[in-house]
Amino acid sequence: MDEQQAKFLLQSGRPRPGDAEDPAFLEALKLADANPPLRAWMEEQQALTDSLQRKLGEVPVPADLKQRILAGAAVTRPAPHPNRRRWFAMAAAGALLLGWGGWQLTNRRSGGGTDIAGLRGDMTAFLDGYFSLDLHTRHLDRVKQHLADVHQFTDYQIPTALAGHDSVGCRKLDWNGGRVMLVCFSVDGELVHLFITPRGTLNPVPEPGTRIAARQEGRFATVGWSDEKNLYLVATPGSAEFLRGTLGGARG
Amino acid sequence: MPNPDFNAMVDAHYEKLYRFAFSLAGDPDTAADLTQQTFYIYASKGDQIRESSRAKAWLFTTLYREFIALRRKAARHPQFELNMMELELPTVSPEAVDRLDYETVVQALGRIEERFRVPLALFHIDELSYREIAELMDVPIGTVMSRISRGRERWLEMLRESGTEPDAANIVPMCAATGT
């Protein structure tokens, strides 16, 4: 190994763990030990590496980034349980238990109904399980862009009370032969989930202007409404008071 | 809620991942999104990555892939093309770099062509070894060394040109590296 080859290997200073055990690096270091000018050059390169490293280490990290990561992870659970996976497969296929009587839906927490109660039960059961999002971003504009680009879903209104908060991300769900868009928000550190589906996905189709009364569904506080195009359902693990305070009177 | 292992993983790596993302994307919002996206993917697959020593490399690799996917959708930013024949460039002393603000250093890095910028950022932000970077980028180790060498020369040249022109005494000739 000549000096030029040694310099190439030692160009950024002393080799790091993982490189230092390599015979070529060991030989270059040995050469530097026996050659003071080469050693001085290597130390200069190491000092330069340290300076550049310090500068890059000064790049400020957003103060709330860690909190956002942890909040987002709450909706992204690892290692789906086989039973949950089966539930997803059923949901994805729109093969939810059909044909149950309406009276049963009001008394059942999850599954089966194609009306508002069924949607509410299935969506909160979904939130209770293991799921991931298709897109993770705090920027609602990017969520909207994703829904438009990937799903051609543009005809909806995000409630103004939620639009001012950071989003967490979004996901498309298949339900009752139709699609439900889930947009998640982080509101004061609490997750708020907004489900949007065309009114025609439900059976019977709810009238425009339908108000879905606030109700505790398992561990989720829920409320909803419909407009000309869609039905909106909001669910949060926060309290009903929190939900009321978040949405206020502004819906749609 | 995320498990303690996940929290520890976030604690250990989120700042360096963010800085790596920032060096790639050049804007804080996209860098934050990329960092979040990386951890979300980890959260959904974390149980498959049991070896914590591999988890760090996995996080950086995943962030880099997410960046590539994001970039495909966006208009390509103009980048500084390196002249591979450029040798014998002057470089800057450590003291001169210390006098620069971090914005200058990061902006100069951001102007370097991506194939050089990625190994440079990995080398200087997370102190990865050449070998680790080679595995992460799936290129031979010699290629990584060559790219870091050329990229660093260009980076330092831009730092020298930007704002704080160092004294002649601070300009140190850097010998040409033998390429691979």
Image (cartoon, coloured by chain):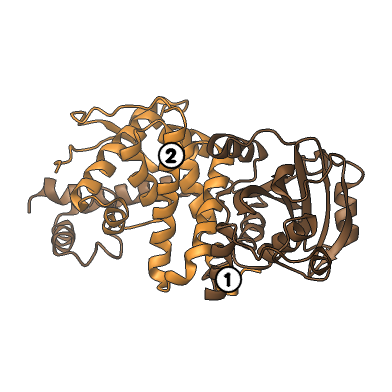
Residue A99: x percent and y percent? 70, 64
Give the number of the disc on residue A181: none
Image point (17%, 40%), residue name: B177
Q: CA distance from mark 1 to mark 2?
A: 54 Å
| Residue B109 image-quadrant placement | top left
Drawn side of residue A84 relative to residue A203, left or right? left
Mark 1, other Cα within 10 Å: few <14 / some 14–19 / many ≥20: some
Residue A59 at least partly seen: no
Residue A138: x percent and y percent? 64, 45
User: Which residue is disc 2 drawn over?
Assistant: B97
Which residue is at the front of the view, A97 or B96? A97
Disc 1 + disc 2, Cβ < 8 Å: no
User: Which residue is disc 1 drawn over?
Assistant: A84
Spot the brown chain and give its letter. Answer: A
Secondary structure state at the residue bearing disc 1: helix
Chain B takes which shade in the image?
A: orange
Drawn side of residue A67 relative to residue A38, left or right? right
Image point (78%, 59%), residue name: A236
Drawn side of residue B162 relative to residue A24, left or right? right
Picture layout, residue B79 above or below residue A41: above
Image point (46%, 34%), residue name: B73
Q: The C terminus of chain A lies in which quarter of the figure?
A: top right
Q: Chain of mark 2?
A: B
Residue extending furthest left?
A: A1
At label 1, the amino acid type is Arg
Mark 2, other Cα within 10 Å: few <14 / some 14–19 / many ≥20: many
Residue A175 at least partly seen: yes
Which residue is at the front of the view, B46 or B135? B46
Residue B33: x percent and y percent? 56, 46
Residue B172: x percent and y percent? 28, 36
Secondary structure state at the residue bearing disc 2: helix
